[in-house]
Image (cartoon, helix red, strand yellow):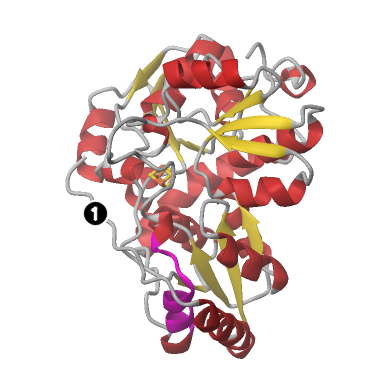
Amino acid sequence: MGEAWARLPEAPSPQEKGVLKERIRALLRREEAVLVAHYYVDAELQELADETGGCVADSLEMARFGRDHAAKTLVVAGVRFMGETAKILSPDKRVLMPDLDATCSLDLGCPADEFSAFCDAHPDRTVVVYANTSAAVKARADWMVTSSIGLEIVADLHARGEKILWAPDRHLGGYIQKKTGADMLLWQASCLVHDEFKGIELDLLRGEYPDAKILVHPESPEAVVALADVVGSTTQLIDAAVRMDAKRFIVATDLGILHKMRLAAPGKTFIEAPTAGNSASCKSCAHCPWMAMNGLANLADVLERGHNEIHVDPAVGVCARVPIDRMLDFAAKHKKRVQASGDLAKDAALFSNVGAA
Ligand code: SF4
């Protein structure tokens, strides 16, 4: 990864928050815009999205919701690749973001020119990229997948004898490779938030809470995934928290998801999985610094002034749409929303028509 930095918006006072929220509600009406937020952004933004008829979801659902919504302006509270994906699927809509510099270490870790050269060097492989990539990288791919459906799509490609070139997340790629047995050549980027979860500390925490179930996002290191009761995308982890009988869960993904989990499963307890530096003076906080760039003030500002618009070169957008549509068609063909529980034993039926997973 090259340079990475994040600029946190100044936190408004409680009184300012009320004023800003009212302003945002009015501006959304004035601009006939809809707010589409990711599970990892601040709880206040998630609540605003929900109460104003927008959505709070994973990156795929965000793009799909935006595409299918009648609004002509989408305001995407998330990181840049999410805004780009929304624009690719809705080229005629105006897509705004509170801060265009909100990026992702996976996107940063996979520059389009280097990736294109990597693809050129392996022309015999089917190119599968994760959603967390730029439009230019998607435009070079055969398939785009999210963590909700990547395992099924790779299992299907493997069953058809295809060899895979996978980018950019090495942990998710390694997890899928292990589960499917597919021949996968992996790009070596990672998510700086999930990379910080530690297997040894998680094992110790499990000892403290033996009744707790462990929910893990597959962008986490292998040692963490190995301890999971459920491995899945953000939506799948929330579903699992609702569905499972346990009263206590240890959660290894961005802590922004805890807001939705607590709403969806009241009465249950959610504990953050341990990250690096437990005994150091600077401890990683399991919160994406770029998701944290979305705030009430810059959201209000972008709606007021109409700046921070996402543009995707139309020619790139047309090419990038092909692998996204392929994934959406796959999901539709297999008659599932991209929302398995992530528990492979319990989801066996979902995988029955795509081969062993
Ligand atoms: S949490 Fe990780 S994968 Fe998600 S946007 Fe942040 S850096 Fe990217």
Queried whether the magenta region covers residue 295, the answer comes back as yes
Instruction: Determine if the C-beta at disc 1 is less than 8 A from ligand 1.
Output: no
Where does residue 351 sit, x and y in percent of width and height?
71, 20
| Segment colored magenta | 293-303
Measured along the vertical axis of the image, is residue 231 above or below residue 145? above
The answer to whether residue 89 is left or right of residue 349 is left
Measured along the vertical axis of the image, is residue 25 above or below residue 201? below
Packing grade of label 1 (10 A; few <14, some 14-19, many >=20) is few
Measured along the vertical axis of the image, is residue 314 above or below residue 256? below
Q: Mark 1: which amino acid?
A: Trp
Asked which quadrant contains residue 232, the reply is top right
Q: Which residue is mark 1?
A: 5
Q: Which of 153 and 295 lies nearest the eye of the viewer?
A: 295
Helix, strand or loop for the magenta stretch, by majority: helix
Residue 176 showing in the rendered view: no
Queried whether the magenta region covers residue 195, the answer comes back as no
